[in-house]
Each structure stands twice: as C-alpha cells, then as structure tokens.
Image (cartoon, rainbow, N blue to C red):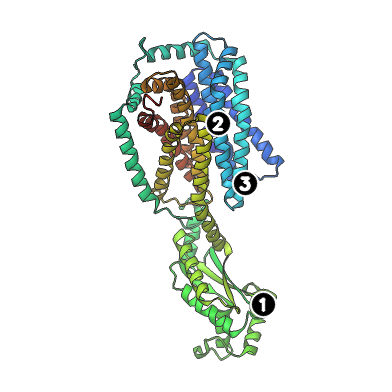
Amino acid sequence: MRQVLVFFVVAAAVCLAILFWYTRCIRSALVVLVCSLVAVVWLLGALASLGFVLDPYLVLVPFLVFAIGLSHGAQKMNGITQDIGRGVDRLMAARLTFRRLFLVGLSALICDVVGFAVLMVIDIPVIKDLAISASIGVAILIVTNLMLLPVLLSYVGVSQSAAARTAANAVADLSDSGHVKHPVWAFLDLFTSRKWASLALLAGTGLALIGFGYSTQLKIGDTDAGAPELRPDSRYNRDNAFMVSHYSASSDVYVVMVKTPQFACAHYSTLRTVDQLELELSQVVGVEATKSLAGLAKVSATGMNEGSVKWFEIPRNQDMLNSIITRAPREMFNQKCDLLSIYLYLRDHKADTLDGVVRAVEDFAQRNNSTEYRFLNAAGNSGIEAATNIVVKEANRKMLLLVYAAVIIISLVTFRSWRAVLCAVLPLMLTSVLCEALMVWLNIGVKVATLPVIALGVGIGVDYALYIMTVMQRYLRDGVSLSEAYYRSLLFTGKIVVLTGVTLGIAVATWYFSPIKFQADMGILLAFMFIWNMLGALVLLPALAHFLYRPSAS
C-alpha cells in the first residue's frame, strides 16, 4: 500500500511539473492540481462513509479520478487563459469557458461514469467495488472540475506573462488569412486531405487486423507462477519456486468436490470412481500429486496386510472401508459423509494449467455423474482462481460491448450526428484492440487486476475526441472548411489533448518500476491507452471526418 501511494505522489508531481512547464503560471497549475486532489479527498471520504476498505485494487481508483480531473481541468484552464490573453477580464473569461466547455465536459464525465458502472455486471466483488468507487469519483469531478475550477480561476486568474504568452502563440500559429504556420499543427492538419486521410485509415485498418490476430491469443488468468501480486523475481516467488521444485510441496491447491447421498461417501462404487478421476487428473499437465479418501483406502488396505503391495487396492468390504474412514483426516469428507474432497497439488496456477484441470474434471463429470455421486468444480485457492477466470472470460466481451454501447449513446445525444459518433468512437475501438495485442506481447493475462483497464481506458480516452469534435463541429456549422475547423480546434483544445495525453502517459509509466506486479501491468496498459487514444483523436478523427463530413454534410 505504501508503494502504491508513493507512485501516486510521483505521478501527481510529474503532472504538476508538466502543467507548469506548459503554462508558466504556478498559481493556475496549482488550482488545477488542487481541484483534482479535492475530488480525490471527497472520494476517500465517501468510500469511508460507505464502509469500503482501501485495498491495493481500490487504491488505484483515486489516481484514475485524479487523471480524469486533470484532463478536464487543463481544458478549463486553457480556455480561460486564452480568453484573458485576448483582453477579457478573468470573471468573463471564466464565464465564457464555462459556457463553451461545460456541456462537452459533462457528456465526457457521464460517459466515464456509465463506462465504470458497466463493470457492475461482472460478478466479482472486488471489480464491483472498483466500479462503484470509480463512478462516485467521476461524479464528484462534475462539481470540482466543471464548476469549482472555473469559480476559483475567476478569483485567482492567471499571470499576465502566461496570458501574454498564450496570446502571442495564438497569433504566431495563424497568419492573417488563417493559414497554418506552426509545423506540428501543419502536419496534423494534413490528415484532413484525401491523400493523408487515406494513408491514415489504411494504416489504422492494418493495425486493427494485426491487433485482432494477436488478441485471439489473449489468455484468461495468470501467466506467471507464484503470487500474482508480486513480480516473478521477488523474494517470495523465488523462495516458492525453490520449495516447489525441490520438495513435494505446492502452494497451488485445487479441490474437486464429490457430492453423494448422506452417509454414502465411503461406498466402494463412489471411491472406485474417485480413484478413476485421480488417475486421469494425474496425467494432466501441471498436476504434481493428488490426495483423496480413495488413495487413503488403498494405502490403509496395504498396511493392514503386512505392507504387501498386492493389497494396494480399494477394499470391497464395506466394514473395512468404514473402519478406514473413522481414522481418515477430517478434511477429506464432511460430518454427514455426503461430500468428499479430492486435493490436486499443481505446479503453478497459470491460465493453461487451470484450463487443463477444469476441462478434465468437467469431461469426467459429464461421463460419470449419476444419482449416486456428482463431481463438482472447485475449491482451494487454485479452484477459486479458476472459477474467477471463467467469470472474467464471460465478462470480458460483454463488458466491452456495454461500455461502447454507453459511449455511443451518450456521444449521439451530445453531437446529434452519427458522423461525429463514428469519428469519436472508431479510434477508441482501435486502441482497445491494440491494447489486447500488447497484453499478448507482454504476456499479461486478463484477470481481476487487468480486466477493468480497457474499460477505464475507453472512458478516459473518449474525453479527447469529445473536446476536439465539439469545437470542430462548431466551426463546421459556421461554414468553414474541414481543414480550418480542425486546425482551430487544435489551437483551442488540441494542444491540451496532447498535453494531458503525454502528461498522464508519463505519469502512469512510472508505475512500471513498482514491485507490485498488477500496478506495473496497469501502468503499462494505461500509458499505452492514454497515448494511443490521444493519437487516435489527433490523426484518425480528422481522417475519418474527411470522408464523412463532405461539403454538403458540413
């Protein structure tokens, strides 16, 4: 927990430093940072009031709230700074920026809230807690960053040097005729032309096909042995690997349950079938050893007959079986003798190992279940993880479909244009596909810690497209060309999209150095999604607009 908090502080410091570098105004940068931190404090208070415990999974939510708040706060600060640079007083500048950006900011935050709330469909308590806490945090941002921030900046304002610098940059970026001068914005504006738009869409299509091919190899569950919370080279995991490889020990226990009628768990037919299952499971890759009442019965029968291996078999005499069961460890069966436990000691809990065991047990159960006994998955730490993997696998695609459905509906309400929705959503879909391909390349499986990342990335990434699309549509309605509309949207909101995308990408990339593995994995994936969502909004959005927004449509 201390490590997670340290990296949170480092990320916040990186964000403040880059904001100050961009604005050259420490007071406005601090106001943006403080409003985002106020939202985090309110969130922590709300979680405490609701009885939530701040475990390592939930402790990542405050940073996500901070990141979303920083994105929206930077847009408000940029708008106010530009208006002050044009000679407008700080109160009027705050009012104008509030009127221009409140609706788009509200739409983006509602997208985030709905996107996080969709995680509630996943029947895993820790993910439901994450969904509730993230939704509460983003809802708080509506007050702190859409309302409180403009009010504070109307009092604090920005330094005259920062305002003058912003005004000078705006003049330098445009000539009197409105043509592009700045080389970076000039390059991005090329994607509104047919040649560059076609190249961008062809490249995006190629990346989508390659990414989809890799994403089909995505594994559900852990891909490393040992404790999944720690890195493979951590002291605990190295010690665990030594114990497993040198001794008959395993920290990964999978339990198959055998349900029988009352007082029938020690019947010969039941134990005989249990022994058959043990034989099949012992041949599954990753199963090191098995233990059950059937195995104990064979050992006991041998011991009762002077150790002769000829008697290494389950006794057919029920009285002898009853005698054996009275001396058996209690963890092998329950008091009513209607539930047996078969213990499997696994080499590891990797996705492939658990999948093989689950398939073997389900196949055996399908062939042998009867009124006398039923074989059920699963208990033990590995059994619970296998069950969790099944839930995660079922929820993965369903979650993405619901997230994108919510984003599409809210974007359609905001823009009232299917063209704008396609321009905003298609780049997000490409990022999601590429993120899954990256997980395959980095050998990161889909599990409780990584499942919410793609949904979180979609929720945060849609902000970039909404801000650019809102400004671009406003200029298109005035009758200007697509090139000029896109360029002016770059000058007003595009700069901040680049700023926040790079800032948040760098900030979460520092998580890679965390000794907590799932935090390092989330840092890599979030940094990738921040950067790619930014590039999608800057490159693919205008390319799509070139073909969708024809002169008659604009």
Amino acid type assigned to the residue bearing label 1 in the image: Cys
Which comes sooner in the sequence, label 2 or label 3?
A: 2
The vertical placement of 470 against 328, above or below, is above
Task: Please give the name of the residue rendered at 55% of the width and 57% of the height, measured from the top-left corner.
Answer: 388
Q: Picture coordinates of residue 255 (x, y %)? A: 56, 68
Separation (CA) of disc 1 from disc 3 = 38 Å
Residue with the mark numbered 3: 129
Task: Please give the name of the residue rendered at 33% of the width and 28% of the height, measured from the top-left corner.
Answer: 191
> From the image, which quarter does the N terminus lie in?
top right
Dot in front, 2 or 1:
2
Q: Secondary structure at mark 2?
A: helix
Whether residue 331 appears in this view of the structure is yes
Q: Which mark is residue 337?
A: 1
Q: Is residue 525 left or right of residue 112?
A: left
How many numbered discs, if any? Answer: 3
Residue with the mark numbered 2: 107
Q: Picture coordinates of residue 176 (x, y %)? A: 36, 9
Residue density around tag 1, few if under 14, some if 14–19, many if 20 or more, within 10 Å: some
Separation (CA) of disc 2 from disc 1 = 59 Å
